[in-house]
Amino acid sequence: MHTPSLQNQFPHAYLSNSTEYKKNLRELLHYAKNVLPSIASTKKNTWPIHHDHCFLRVILDNIVGCAWYEVIPSPAYKNLTDEQVSAALCLAKQLATESVSLHTLNQRSKQWRNKQLKLVF
């Protein structure tokens, strides 16, 4: 029985071995695991999320336009395309500088996952 290759099963997930891809992936993971949680710790009352896995969820969901696991095989960080890594890193940097709304991106992510939205009165 023939088993299709990962590239045939998920053609969008062809992985790059380029130096730039690896650098961008390392930087993305650094932002998600260190930079953003560090910033969040100083903004406990204003940022809705604080943990590294939450930042990755928000970033990945927003770059693919749905729950990331619907289009990216798990583990996501090992299956991102060049374009996805670049977009994710760009979004992580925008979150760090607060040039995009973390609240909006988090709410979008929750909607795609059918999670309870927080009501603010």
Image (cartoon, helix red, strand yellow):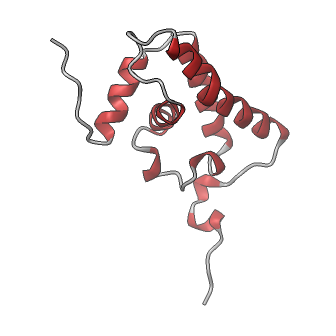
Q: Is 78 placed above or below 42 here?
A: below
Percent position (x, y) of residue 23?
A: 78, 34
Residue name at image x 55 percent, y 22 percent: 37
Percent position (x, y) of residue 56?
A: 52, 35
Q: Is 93 placed above or below 97 here?
A: below
Q: Nearer the viewer, residue 113 or 51?
A: 51
Percent position (x, y) of residue 75?
A: 58, 52
Residue name at image x 47 percent, y 37 percent: 57
- Check the image and name the residue furthest to the right: 19
Residue name at image x 15 percent, y 11 percent: 121
Judged left or right of residue 23, residue 13 is left
- Check the image and name the residue furthest to the bottom: 1
Q: Quadrant of residue 10?
A: bottom right
Q: Is 106 placed above or below 44 here?
A: below
Please identify the quadrant where the N terminus is shown. bottom right
Q: Quadrant of residue 52?
A: top right
Percent position (x, y) of residue 88?
A: 59, 31
Residue name at image x 62 percent, y 85 percent: 2
Q: How many marks?
A: 0
Judged left or right of residue 88, residue 55 is left
